[in-house]
């Protein structure tokens, strides 16, 4: 038997962050654009953009910053708050997954 | 912000136990019958019975025992394995939920 866990974060009862959203943010950071992140997630640009705006609206902070123009035409990067959100969520997820595994082993294997 | 967690247990890639199944088992134990447990869960008898059989099939153990006859006509109780499964799952869930809460606080509140 294996324990399974799904984690997410809510604010005022609304889903504000999750593995899926973390993955999208990560792809945007790595590709330097919302369209690049959208493509890697198999999403339309419009849908990826909507997810980002939704997170920003629900949290009340900007998580990406778009710079227009320049060679290659613009670029999207994470704001400090966006980077911090992603880093904190990953740290939370890693610790929680590890604890869930240990808690399962203790409950099910102990004296088993 | 609040962390949220959904836990379940798989065996060979199949869902074998969850909060929902734990609740059903608990209601069967408390009411002394599958039909009583089903009613408290808002399920048909057939569906509750099917869930129990599915868990038993996937885990390869009997988790309930039905005694036929007697005054009031029969009674269903948890087997030792059923009681143990429920107790272990609850212990796992309580520990995991507590850890997830602490992991979230550490990741999001620390230096926040």
Image (spheres, coloured by chain):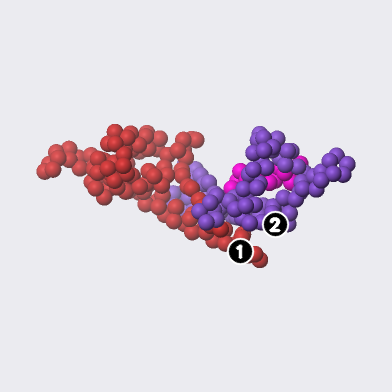
Chain colours: A purple, B red
Which chain contains the residue that carries disc 1? B
| Residue B76 spot, x, y in % from top left | 23, 42
According to the picture, the residue beneath numbered tag 1 turns out to be B109
Outermost residue on the left side: it is: B71
Residue found at x 81% / y 46% = A68
Image marks 1 and 2: residues in contact by CB distance under 8 Å: no
Which residues are the magenta region? A18-31
User: For this rendering, which residue is in front, A20 or A73?
Assistant: A73
Q: Is residue A92 left or right of residue A3?
A: right
Q: Which mark is residue B2?
A: none
Q: Can I make out residue A87 in this image? A: no
Q: Is residue B27 left or right of residue B90?
A: left
Classified by dominant secondary structure, the portion drawn in magenta counts as helix
According to the picture, the residue beneath numbered tag 2 turns out to be A81
Q: Give the crowd class for mark 2: few <14, some 14-19, many >=20 residues within 10 Å.
A: few
Q: CA distance from mark 1 to mark 2?
A: 14 Å
Q: Secondary structure at mark 2?
A: helix
Which chain contains the residue that carries disc 2? A
Q: Can I make out residue A54 in this image? A: yes
Q: Is residue A30 magenta?
A: yes
Q: Nearer the viewer, mark 1 or mark 2?
A: 2
| Residue B16 spot, x, y in % from top left | 42, 39
The N terminus of chain B: image quadrant: bottom right
Q: Is residue A100 magenta?
A: no
């Amino acid at each position: 038997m294996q324990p399974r866990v799904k984690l997410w974060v809510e604010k005022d009862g609304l889903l504000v962050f999750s593995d899926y959203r973390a993955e999208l943010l990560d792809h945007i950071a790595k590709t330097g654009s919302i369209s690049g992140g959208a493509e890697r997630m198999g999403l339309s640009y419009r849908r990826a953009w909507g997810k980002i705006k939704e997170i920003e609206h629900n949290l009340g902070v900007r998580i990406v910053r778009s710079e227009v123009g320049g060679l290659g035409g613009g670029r999207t990067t994470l704001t400090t708050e966006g980077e911090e959100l992603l880093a904190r969520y990953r740290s939370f997820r890693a610790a929680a997954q590890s604890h869930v595994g240990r808690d399962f082993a203790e409950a099910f294997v102990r004296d088993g």
